[in-house]
Image (spheres, rainbow, N blue to C red):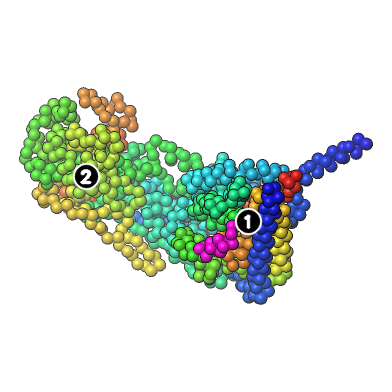
Amino acid sequence: MALDTAQLTIRRAASRFTDSIDGPLFALSVVLVGIGLVTLYSASYEYPARVTAQLANLAVAFTAMWLIAQASPQTLMRFAVPVYFFGILLLVAVALFGDVANGARRWLHVGVTRFQPSEMMKIAMPLMLAWYFHRHEATLRALDFIVAGLLLLVPVLLIARQPDLGTAVLVLAAGCYVIFFAGLSWKVIAGLVVVGIGALFPLWGMLHDYQRRRVLTLLDPTTDPLGAGYHIIQSTIAVGSGGILGKGWLRGTQTHLEFIPERHTDFIFAVFSEEFGLAGNCVLLLLYLLLIARGLMIAANAPTFFSRLLAGAVTLIFFTYAFVNMGMVSGILPVVGVPLPFVSYGGTALATLFVGIGILMSIHRHRKLVQT
Amino acid sequence: MRLTELKNHERELYYFQLRIGAAGIAVLIAFGILFARFFYLQVIQRDYYHTKAEDNRISIVPIPPNRGLILDRNGVVLARNYSAYTLEIMPAKVSDLESTINGLAEVVDIQPRDRSRFKKLLAETRNADSLPIRTRLTDEEVARFAANRYRFAGVEIKARLFRQYPFEALASHVIGYIGRINDKDQERLAEQGVDANYRGTDFIGKSGLEGSYQNELHGTTGIEQVEIDAGGRGIRTLSRTPALAGNDITLALDIKLQQVAESSFGDRRGALVALDPSNGGVLAFVSKPGYDPNLFVEGIDPQSWAELNNSPDRPLNNRAINGLYPPGSTFKPFLALAALETGKRKPAQAIFDPGHFDFGGRRFRDDKIGGHGTVDMYRSIVESCDTYYYILSNDMGIDLIARSIAPFGFGSRTGIDLDGESAGILPSPEWKRKRFRKPEQQKWYAGETISIGIGQGYNAYTPMQLAQATAAIANNGVLYKPHLVNYVDNQRTNTRRTIEPELSRKIPFQPEHVEFIKKAMAGVNTAGTGARAFAGAQYTSGGKTGTAQVIAIKANEKYIEKNVAERHRDHSLFIAFAPLENPKIALAVIVENGGFGARAAAPIARAVLDYYLLGKTPPEPKQVPVIETLKEGASD
């Protein structure tokens, strides 16, 4: 009897603990992370401690996810404005006092560690815009879209100036998704696309030399085989030589002869693709597709304007990560610093992604609460 | 009302879900493109890429070039190379550095200073793939490590080239030193677009000639194409473009003369520059104290670094080109020549010196109590009469002084082939306006002009500038840019490039004016303040003593040396050239806190001139033994 009560209490406590966790989302992200660890082991054979380090990153990321999942969307909404402006403040601080690494000013020293404030903008941006549109839901006018555009452009330009094109693209995309879901008219979207293409030319002039080189070498990597083209040539060889079934785990020659640069971070997909081939790629695509589908489903069923916009945007950020990364590694998109979501090594990106998952879980869990 | 709201809500949800659908379709299309790309690469083009990957078995290994030698004017080697085995750790491939080093310490001798040096290197160079924990391993240590190699992943023995400076601290400020390429160097090399030529090179010139002639000394990096097996180990060399050794540089400097000069300083601090007036060649270049550049080669350990960096003697400071000193009375011949040239004085024009000059309620004292009496220009130089120059500078005014002194090169960089030379301060109202910010500080006071005349006040010049100005008098107004290097030799093509003397400027002195000043300076060494130091010299010479105040002495106070702390004592200066008729050498000496110019600095000048003109042989400079270099071919 007493044993039963104890069991019940434990079960209750456990269910309290897991209540907020959405099964499908959690399962999908865990499988992706597992693929990541397996690939990471192969990519860093010379330094196995990286796998352990990634496990530690994972613990942090899971905690972040769980905490966010506990919160209600209303709580998240309260954080939107302070987090956004705090982020802007940090970006300005980076521009003024940041550390320079690889020719870019991205890092801010906080005590003993360095971190990239631009990273938090990937979440803060959609949060802020979703909050803004939610507040003006009843009276949405053209002016609101212009204000949203400005709220979006300020951090994007600050990040692009660092220069960190990869993060700028992701933050820009995140903001655009919110604006799109908020109902920007198709005519305006078409108009913006036309203007955007027209603006490519002056934008080209604003790019840094190394960014231009990356775009140019994408068009013809052989022009710079030892410099910027090297990444693309070697990663394309890795992907292509993988064939249908791949060379097998730990047997990728491109990987193990150190021909793939950044092979545990941004170019980990080349390692995966070489060792697991087209079959592995299809599995990966499918997993991402399922994750995105689940996210969009949550968005479609979300009760409030805020949670709908946020869920939709966060889901599409996952998509953008995956598409841009696989596109650049396989040589159809320029090399910008975007990791493969849930797979690449790196604590910051992993934490950001799982915060996103946590947001989706929170929205899903509270889908009925408001309606009653 | 509620119904429409609900309807609106449903419509809104419907539109939103439409957009979700649109997004879903976009995602499917994008993933479809990716799939098509994968299919193209991995199925259609698979064979092509497979062959490419198979061919990808060639690794390109850079071969660092031998660094050029530095030789003195007689071919004595001042900087040479040797190769030795080093034990290197690849930090990226070692998970626990501390325990790896502890393990290594059981196999080879690793001292605490080796550890602290390694830590310093690790902190300075973030992207280095390999850093030394021990250098110059003995054969026995190499063998012991080889037997234990399996225990240490990410640790390797490598044959590396090192630099050796056989004369240790002698001429250290001329030669400088090399050190490991750090992140800052790397950035600079990338900016210059030469980083590719530094692949495989660990060291770069940091100071002295090693720094300023880095591009000549470095050479061209070679390339070896090596076929590697699936494990990444080299199987055979496919092709080899040998490295081209850097150029040797031969100096105008004579290391024996340098030795004479440095040993005459003893333990005293100071600087000496000796020039060949006819071409600007630097014959001796002393900055005391020096330091042992060998300490820097393998990366200086923090303790030695702290000792050098915190010493009150500031041994790392190159006093010859960065030390700024008031010239004191050595300034007088230059001002006298300027007065002749501008017509402000005639040689015979005399003043009466009562032992002081009063101006604006202040009394400017002469060194000689009671004064020199009636003094013309000749006596003013030979006896170093201050009052003569108080009156002269008052008559000339600061603007004319600044204008007519500048051509000697005072207050502007000489352009010597070393980096980071100081410009010195040629005082003028304009300089003061720029230098100070408060209006009351910016104003030039007439009283300030008076002490300028005896080389005090704001006057501050490098010993290099003082030597150059002395050479200008010796060479009748023709100034050459001082240069340490005479020749750059390419050993491979056996060609020699001569660094041609470069004319800085020609000052159009009236010949009789320069002759007069030279005669007066000769008088200094025969009958004046320099006579004692030059007693019995077997050659003719011109000179001038100088004593520069370090602290201000109050108007009615007498400077008594023994009452003043050592570091606040006057600096002792001497300038000289010889022989009088056809000067072969011109020099400037400063002995910090040496007191009266004739006592400390003049004997050093005498010793240098004696050796240079008479060949009075000094003891051979001490050299460290040559480190035996590894046999050819041992470098793999």
Question: What residue appears at the point 29 percent right and 25 percent down from the top-left corner?
Answer: B563
Residue A188 shown in magenta:
yes
Residue with the most extreme front position: B1
Q: Amino acid at mark 1?
A: Phe
At which x and y percent is residue A27? 76, 54
Question: What residue appears at the point 26 percent right and 50 percent down from the top-left corner?
Answer: B275
Give how far apart the Cα atoms at labels 1 and 2 are. 87 Å
Chain of residue at mark 1: A
Residue A310 shown in magenta:
no
- Mark 1 nearby-residue class (10 Å; few <14, some 14–19, many ≥20): many
Find numbered disc 1 in the image and state the secondary structure of the residue it sits on. helix
Magenta segment, prevailing SS (helix, strand or loop): helix
Task: Identify the magenta region.
Answer: A184-196
* Residue that label 2 marks: B576
At which x and y percent is residue B503? 23, 57
Viewer-side residue, A298 vs B307: A298
- In the rendered structure, find residue A181 and report the number of the disc placed on it: 1
Q: Quadrant of the N terminus of chain A?
A: top right
On the same chain: label 1 and label 2? no
Question: What residue appears at the point 47 percent right and 41 percent down from the top-left corner?
Answer: B304
At which x and y percent is residue A193? 54, 63
Find numbered disc 2 in the image and state the secondary structure of the residue it sits on. strand
Location of residue A319 by image quarter: bottom right
At which x and y percent is residue B114? 55, 45
Chain of residue at mark 2: B
